Image: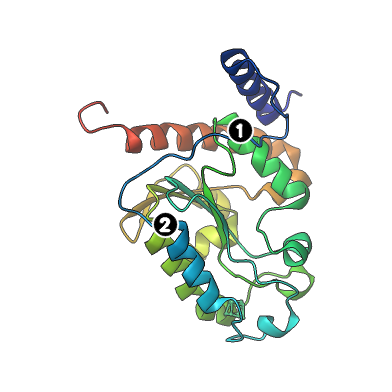
Amino acid sequence: MEDPFEASAAAYLRQQAEIYGMELPLDGKLLKNPPSNGNKATSKDLESFYNEIKECQLCPLGTTRTKFVFGVGNPNADLMLIGEAPGRNEDLQGEPFVGRAGQLLDKILAAIKLSREEVYIANVLKCRPPNNRDPLKSESDTCQPYLKQQIELIKPKLILALGRVSGAWLLGEDLALKDMRNKSYIYNGIEMMVTYHPAALLRNPNWKRPCWEDMQKVRDRILALTQPQGLV
Ligand code: SF4
């Protein structure tokens, strides 16, 4: 069966290559000028915040982590992606969504004509839980002010929770993923949607099709939310 993300990302890259007359890599890393959204965070705001919290030892994960995983991307992003917690590769590299799940996330973004450099990506937890277990409630509760502050600085137009743990944490309800998909929520005044975690798509490729349907809705909402008023 055709992979919807491969097909859409490849079509987009071909189109960009025709428009700009250049070779583009097929790994979804499209270098474009980040969108400017006026009065939002600057990279300095985020950097200061990172420097404030990077040595955090407020929960036991501070002693077992290799690297603190703050977040990455455009401080002016319209779309903010929120995963659960760093995994092994993220813990080693200090960046969220690297490794195979990260490569798939890049393709998912390219399929809706976005790159990693244009969105902001963070996790609920900044440090890796041992053996990739689900975060404990006490850990999420302790860490959550950091993510809230990042959201407050970035002020995205849309939050996309990746996976059940992240969606349930943001919604404050222990719901199954199937009950959170296909809906729009408001998180602290910001529109929010939920879809599959890329690692889940690697485990079960049958979920790529419904995830692609979710991503088309995300693309439509981003377009609607960023249109000048009166054009929507
Ligand atoms: S997980 Fe969060 S609260 Fe725990 S040590 Fe890391 S940054 Fe601090």
Residue 226: % across, % down:
34, 36
> What's the CA distance linking mark 2 and mark 1?
24 Å
> Which quadrant of the structure image shows residue 201?
top right
Residue at 65% in and 27% down: 9
Marker disc for residue 175: none
Could you tell me the amino acid type at mark 1? Answer: Ala
Quarter of the picture holding the C terminus: top left
Label 1 belongs to which residue? 110
Residue 15: % across, % down:
60, 16
Residue at 51% in and 31% down: 216
Residue 224 sits above or below residue 166 on the image: above
> Which quadrant of the structure image shows residue 131?
bottom right
Residue 57 sits above or below residue 8 on the image: below
Residue at 43% in and 68% down: 148
Marker disc for residue 42: 2
User: Between tags 2 and 1, which lies in front?
Assistant: 2
Instruction: Ligand 1: give its quadrant.
Output: bottom right
